[in-house]
Image (cartoon, helix red, strand yellow):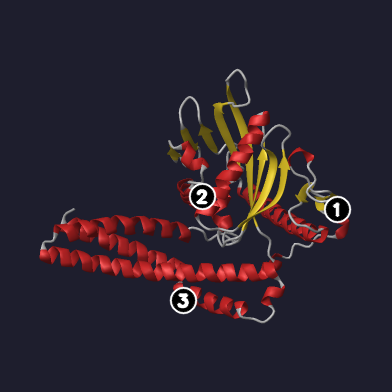
Amino acid sequence: MATEDFQAELRALNQTFDSIVQVSAPDEIRQRIARLSDEASAPGLWDDPERAQAVTSRLSHAQAELDKLNAMGSRLEDLGVLFEMAEEASDEETLAEARTELAAVRQSLADMEIRTLLNGEYDERFAVVTIRSGAGGVDAADFAEMLLRMYLRWAERHNYPVKVLDTSYAEEAGLKSVTFEVSTPYAYGNLSVEGGTHRLVRISPFDNQGRRHTSFAAVEVIPLIEDSDHIDIPDTDIKVDVFRSSGPGGQSVNTTDSAVRMTHLPTGIVVSMQDEKSQIQNRAAALRVLQSRLLVLRRAEEAAKKKELAGDIKASWGDQMRSYVLHPYQMVKDLRTDHEVGSTSAVFDGDIDGFIDAGIRWRRRQERAT
């Protein structure tokens, strides 16, 4: 790379970083860190473990965000110095090191830029994800379990805490549905672009004739409710059923009726919860997820009304947003963004950041176009 080209790209990267700093507002991050630090040191915080974990998680995330900004500023300064030293000494080895660092900084800035696009009302929230098997019989149930593993591996790669809240097993194999919570800031902003219909094409391992099958699974992503959202649900609007938790094959997990099924009568929304040991804990968890779904429903109704008034009735998301093809070729392709990869095994092992980043950028383009 010529000197002029290197300097031009370095200037461009510095401009990108300046834009990221402006959007990220480090002064506001410092204020948030100070406020969360006070909350984290308050006596009795851990009397409410869920709130304590949320506070400490947000504090850790805010500090990491500030550290990342500071580190990137230092890297850009050091990169400029490194290149100047290499030029003055005509040191090819140091020049090669500077070029390698330039490429690494370019990628890091692209990743940081994605974060600046997560500025929606609920993007900073934790996420509640539900996967349901669709058309395709046992293959669809197996696909739902494959997607669950994919998201759990993705969370594990990033050290994001995950808690499975409810699991409904299919009779032969796989899952009818599963709900889990990803407890890290901006989990909803990132995973919300995963919501929609996913399609799998493969030679079915459940077909003794070795035929190709197509199956579907639906992924729903909602932000976790917070106390400030004020979703009040009258007791008369809720029907609560209790039953014994169970695992595959009907095996009893415990001997008490601790699992809870909560039905919101006006909308028909049903939430089941069986992860906790006590009925009281499961009831509280089910109510929290129900409130989250009602919050999303309210937002959807408000958005639909706005579109109706504006005369725009186009849906933002198609029925099928991503295809996973294992036969006759190997490919995973997002039909909204056209992002695709050939390593299906890597995707199912949680390597989906490329799809998430492309989805976030696509969503921002859609928002700007409306």
Q: Nearer the viewer, mark 1 or mark 2?
A: 1
| 27 shown above or below 231 | below
Name the residue that disc number 2 marks. Answer: 363
Name the residue that disc number 3 marks. Answer: 27
- Report whether residue 5 is seen: yes
Amino acid type of the residue tagged 1 in the rendering: Thr
Q: Nearer the viewer, mark 2 or mark 3?
A: 3
Name the residue that disc number 1 marks. Answer: 256
Mark 1 or 2 closer to N-term?
Answer: 1
User: In the figure, is residue 225 to the left or right of 111?
Assistant: right
Q: Return the residue nearer the eye: 203 or 363.
A: 203
Amino acid type of the residue tagged 3 in the rendering: Asp
> Number of numbered discs present?
3
The residue lying at 69 percent from left, 42 percent from top is 177
Q: Position of residue 169 (x, y in %)?
A: 72, 40
Are the residues flagged by discs 1 and 3 in contact, CB closer than 8 Å?
Answer: no
Secondary structure at numbered mark 3: helix
Mark 2 or 3 closer to N-term?
Answer: 3
